[in-house]
Image (tube, rainbow, N blue to C red):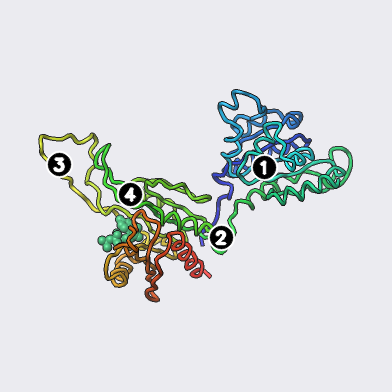
């Protein structure tokens, strides 16, 4: 198994809404701690929050502008409240005051913070902090329950001395507990949690000159579907993708490359991994030398392109002496003798499984670019034919096979 040495916050974007409470000062340390773990932080400071910390100290730590006023025209031009709330992976309100929680329950949008909260399509977490009587008040407790029902994650306040001199529940959770809650949120759960899986997908582009390239019709749909299916089972997925028109799957690390050489380098930089699945339609050849300038027509003379073979990424990963993934899976495009050809390919490449596509036609639909795929899974145990199915379904079945392999 690959050791997870980095934080689950790495590369994630937080929108931190700092409410008006004495505990707002803890947010300054929180910003530092999550940034150390690779998170980027944008902040909204409410009017109340501004009584306790200054926009300058918040920006100084976050390294970004602090947003304070809903009706600032320059802010709306630079970054509207909708964008602010959407360009984050998670929204955290800390400290969340009783007033803020009541407004969230009611859907009131009367300032930048509450407007962003109403407009967001991202998960929201709140860390309440207030006087213990306010926290225990039936209205606040009713609001907490409603917010949880609305899908909001609540980091409960702790008990102890409160700033108002009283003792009881209502203290903002400590910074390390806030960080732990954030890390817990982004740590995948599921049967493949802790497994790292590399997937290659899409076509490669092999440049002829600065404007022309050799490519193929691969859409990347099957590889992207496999990335989604494995992420849903909790795996850490690194998708190394040639050019496609597809959206990056959620919570998957995507490395965009163009050529076979770049794809190989990206795979090797991403090792070690527990599994490698080579779904990409890698160009078998590239020109021996990419022309530095656009090749011009030369009075009817046809340019001769000298080709050289590309590295076979599947074969190289399968034969990696130091970093071979435990399970290496290849794809094979076949039109006839599917099972026998795939078995021979399995041996030739040194991989563990081959998913053989029948690319003749799938009920009249083309596999390349289409939504369906008819495959056979070839392993040491033999060949298994799967019915023609949507690429998402093929992906789910393959992900389940991989889950079984590791249990
Ligand atoms: N592959 C690769 N690097 C290459 C070529 C292929 O990683 N340079 C991988 C593909 O991602 C796929 C498998 O190898 O997993 C396909 O093997 P390939 O030899 O290209 O087979 P086919 O495309 O099926 O073609 P052929 O039968 O002509 O060999």
Badge 1 crowding class, 10 Å Cα cut-off, few under 14, some 14 to 19, many 20 or more, is many
Sequence order check, earlier mark of 4 and 3 = 4
Q: Nearer the viewer, mark 3 or mark 2?
A: 3
Residue under numbered circle 4 = 204
Tally of numbered discs: 4
Residue under numbered circle 3 = 303
Residue under numbered circle 2 = 193
Q: Against 152, is 83 above or below?
A: above
Residue 92 got which mark?
A: 1
Q: Against 17, is 51 above or below?
A: above
Question: Considering depth in this image, is 102 or 299 the residue closer to the camera?
Answer: 102
The picture places residue 93, in percent across and down from the top left corner, at 70, 41
Badge 2 crowding class, 10 Å Cα cut-off, few under 14, some 14 to 19, many 20 or more, is some
**In the orientation shown, which residue stands out farthest toward the right?**
166
Q: Secondary structure at mark 1?
A: strand
Q: Are marks 3 and 2 in contact (CB under 8 Å)?
A: no
Badge 3 crowding class, 10 Å Cα cut-off, few under 14, some 14 to 19, many 20 or more, is few
- Is 124 on the left or on the right of 394, as rendered? right
The picture places residue 284, in percent across and down from the top left corner, at 26, 54
Q: Secondary structure at mark 2?
A: loop
Q: Is residue 315 visible?
A: no
Q: Are marks 1 and 4 in contact (CB under 8 Å)?
A: no
């Amino acid at each position: 198994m690959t050791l997870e040495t980095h934080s689950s916050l790495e590369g994630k974007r937080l929108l931190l809404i700092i409410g008006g409470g004495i505990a707002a000062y803890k947010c300054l340390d929180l910003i530092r701690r999550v940034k150390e773990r690779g998170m980027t932080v944008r902040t909204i400071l409410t009017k109340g929050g501004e009584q306790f910390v200054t926009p300058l100290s918040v920006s100084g730590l976050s390294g970004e502008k602090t947003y304070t006023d809903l009706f600032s025209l320059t802010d709306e031009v630079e970054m509207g409240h909708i964008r602010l709330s959407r360009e984050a992976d998670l929204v955290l309100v800390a400290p969340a005051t009783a007033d803020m929680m009541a407004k969230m329950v009611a859907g009131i949008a009367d300032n930048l913070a509450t407007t962003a909260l109403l407009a967001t399509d991202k998960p929201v977490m709140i860390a309440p902090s207030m006087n213990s009587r306010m926290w225990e008040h039936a209205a606040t407790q009713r609001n907490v329950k409603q917010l949880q029902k609305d899908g909001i994650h609540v980091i409960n306040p702790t008990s102890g001395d409160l700033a108002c001199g009283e003792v009881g529940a209502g203290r903002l959770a400590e910074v390390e507990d806030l960080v732990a809650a954030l890390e817990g949120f982004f740590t995948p759960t599921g049967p493949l949690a802790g497994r790292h899986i590399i997937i290659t997908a899409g076509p490669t582009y092999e440049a002829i000159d600065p404007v022309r390239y050799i490519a193929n019709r691969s859409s990347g749909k099957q590889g992207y579907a496999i990335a989604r299916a494995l992420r849903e089972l909790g795996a850490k997925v690194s998708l190394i993708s040639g050019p496609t028109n597809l959206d990056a799957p959620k919570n998957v690390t995507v490395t965009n490359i163009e050529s076979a050489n770049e794809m190989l380098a990206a795979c090797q930089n991403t090792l070690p991994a527990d599994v490698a699945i080579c779904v990409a339609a890698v160009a078998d050849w590239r020109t021996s030398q990419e022309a530095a300038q656009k090749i011009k027509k030369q009075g009817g003379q046809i340019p001769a392109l000298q080709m050289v073979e590309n590295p076979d990424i599947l074969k190289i990963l399968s034969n990696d002496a130091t970093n071979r993934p435990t399970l290496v899976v290849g794809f094979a495009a076949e039109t006839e003798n599917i099972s026998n050809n795939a078995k021979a390919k399995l041996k030739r490449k040194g991989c563990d499984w081959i998913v053989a596509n029948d690319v003749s036609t799938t009920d009249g639909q083309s596999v390349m670019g289409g939504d369906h795929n008819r495959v056979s899974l070839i392993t040491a145990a033999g060949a298994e034919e799967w019915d023609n199915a949507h690429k998402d379904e093929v992906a789910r079945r393959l992900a389940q096979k991989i889950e079984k392999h590791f249990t």
